[in-house]
């Protein structure tokens, strides 16, 4: 298709600084000031969490680029807004034009080089026939709703509708003014013993780094408290001894077997009180939390804590990749029948196999005291059922609010002493069929902060 030559794209801030050139189409003489549409883009999105780049395209009604220079990638950080530029038009006859603007993250670009539509604000408008000042709004209500050649998201409903003509004037949206961009907070001084404020607010649940499930979904967590450590044998034993909880974890079995790595020794034996509780099923874990006036953590709460909330770090401690120096993972042994054969972190180190006691650890999050052992020691039960990240449940737009997936198949987060190094990553998740009570799985509890 032949692109119209009567259109030029002059990306210029409303100041002498020129972002792009209008000379490509060759229709403007030296020193001549062309008529133009002056575009102002605004957004209420929290930046840079949901975007740091603006992909701007001037298109024909059929969706093709209207000129050779009609695509620009602009700065999408908060400091750049409101973003303004000009689209110049010559005195020749002007065809109908469309403007497409996509606010996205640089890390969320598909192999084809285009933004991930599920995590992008994508708006199209028709430019009016008469050049002049117009605005383009990028509202969070339209996050994850990709436009088409003939339709774009209606911010009133979040659904696709006919392309509107660009409104005159400047955008009224302010960066970070979306309602979910300002989370409530809890107060550490009021946190129950052994708990801290969890990373409430917006974060991306899922991962673009996991080749098995490359999906991310924007989620919002209401303020909550979270146990600093995995639940200890001592705390569980006190609840069981008091009769508050009648079910008991699996008792330690014979040495040299998997049951020999269970940490619970019975309601009257305090020898292992400092160890994290394992060999416990999800139902009993939930009851032990409930007996303390807490709840078993959701998968989203564990994911946010492990990735430091909106930071989205690869590990609980950050991006450092020396996992063996940080987390209790890959410390299994081939001498126990049925054990997973992951022992890379024990080779030449003299480290024992099995879980370690709760307490100070280099596997800790960014918070002042730090949530500990989210990457290793024991994988941790979530209260959710396991659902693949492309399941319809996760597709809520524009945001998942305090999600808890249904289902009977269990899900655990994080790595364990018995698992591979890769499971230490903050997005690691696994399914457990049946009512598993393995020596590599424990849990921690949460509590709403309201």
Image (spheres, rainbow, N blue to C red):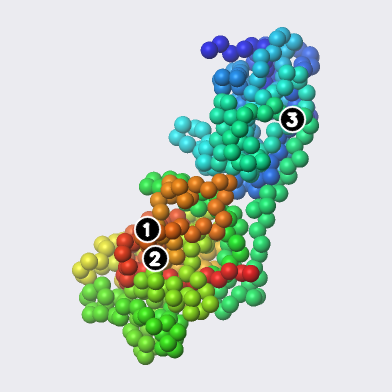
Q: Position of residue 172 (x, y in %)?
A: 76, 40
Q: Quadrant of residue 44?
A: top right
Q: Which mark is residue 198?
A: none
With 200 as the anchor, is 383 left or right in this view? left
Residue 300 visible in image:
yes
Pointer 1 or 2: first along the chain: 2
Depth check, mark 3 against mark 2: the one in front is 3
**As displayed, is residue 222 above or below residue 444?**
above
**As displayed, is residue 250 above or below residue 450?**
below
| Crowding at mark 2 (Cα within 10 Å: few <14, some 14-19, many 20+) | many
**As displayed, is residue 163 above or below residue 442?**
above
Secondary structure type for disc 1: strand
Q: Position of residue 287 (x, y in %)?
A: 44, 76
The residue carrying mark 1 is: 430
With 297 as the anchor, is 27 left or right in this view? right
The residue carrying mark 2 is: 379
Q: Are marks 1 and 3 in contact (CB under 8 Å)?
A: no
User: So how many labels did they put on this image?
Assistant: 3
Pointer 1 or 3: first along the chain: 3
Residue 367 visible in image:
no
Q: Are marks 3 and 2 in contact (CB under 8 Å)?
A: no
Q: Position of residue 2 (x, y in %)?
A: 56, 11
Depth check, mark 1 against mark 3: the one in front is 3
- Tell which of 292 and 368 is nearer to you: 292
Q: Quadrant of residue 375?
A: bottom left
The residue carrying mark 3 is: 167
| Crowding at mark 3 (Cα within 10 Å: few <14, some 14-19, many 20+) | some
For the point 68% across and 52% down, the residue is 179
């Amino acid at each position: 298709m032949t692109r119209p030559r009567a259109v030029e794209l002059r990306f210029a801030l409303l100041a002498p600084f020129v972002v792009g050139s209008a000379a490509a189409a060759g229709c403007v003489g030296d020193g001549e000031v062309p008529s133009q549409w002056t575009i102002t883009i605004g957004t209420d999105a929290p930046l840079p969490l949901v975007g740091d780049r603006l992909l701007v395209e001037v298109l024909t009604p059929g969706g093709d680029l209207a000129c050779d220079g009609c695509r620009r990638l602009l700065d999408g950080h908060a400091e750049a807004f409101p973003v303004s530029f000009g689209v110049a038009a010559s005195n020749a006859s002007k065809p109908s034009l469309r403007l497409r603007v996509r606010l996205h993250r640089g890390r969320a670009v598909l192999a084809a080089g285009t933004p991930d539509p599920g995590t992008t604000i994508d708006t199209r408008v028709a430019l009016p026939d008469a050049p002049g000042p117009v605005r383009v709004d990028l509202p969070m209500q339209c996050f994850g709703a990709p436009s088409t050649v003939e339709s774009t998201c209606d911010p009133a409903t979040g659904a696709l509708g006919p392309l509107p003509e660009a409104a005159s004037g400047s955008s009224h949206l302010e960066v970070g003014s979306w309602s979910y961009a300002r989370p409530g907070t809890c107060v550490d001084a009021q946190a129950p013993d052994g708990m801290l404020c969890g990373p409430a607010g917006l974060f991306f649940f899922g991962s673009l780094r996991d080749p098995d499930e490359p999906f991310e979904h924007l989620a919002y967590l209401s303020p909550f408290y979270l146990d600093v450590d995995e639940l200890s044998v001592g705390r569980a034993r006190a609840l069981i001894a008091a009769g508050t909880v009648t079910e008991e974890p699996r008792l330690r079995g014979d040495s040299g077997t998997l049951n020999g790595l269970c940490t619970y020794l019975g309601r009257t034996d305090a020898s292992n009180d400092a160890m994290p509780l394992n060999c416990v099923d999800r139902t009993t874990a939930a009851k032990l939390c409930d007996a303390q006036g807490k709840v078993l953590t959701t998968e989203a709460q564990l994911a946010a804590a492990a990735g430091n909330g909106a930071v989205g770090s690869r590990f609980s401690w950050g991006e450092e990749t020396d996992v063996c120096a940080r987390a209790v993972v890959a410390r299994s042994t081939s001498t126990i029948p049925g054990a997973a054969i992951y022992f890379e972190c024990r080779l030449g180190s003299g480290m024992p196999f099995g879980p370690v006691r709760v307490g100070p650890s280099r596997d800790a999050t960014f918070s002042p005291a730090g949530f500990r052992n989210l990457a290793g020691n024991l994988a941790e039960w979530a209260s959710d059922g396991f659902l693949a990240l492309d399941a319809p449940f996760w597709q809520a737009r524009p945001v998942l609010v305090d999600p808890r997936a249904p289902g009977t198949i269990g899900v655990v987060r994080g790595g364990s002493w018995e698992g591979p190094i890769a499971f230490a990553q903050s997005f690691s998740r696994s399914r457990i069929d049946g009512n598993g009570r393995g020596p590599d799985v424990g849990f921690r509890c949460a509590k709403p902060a309201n």
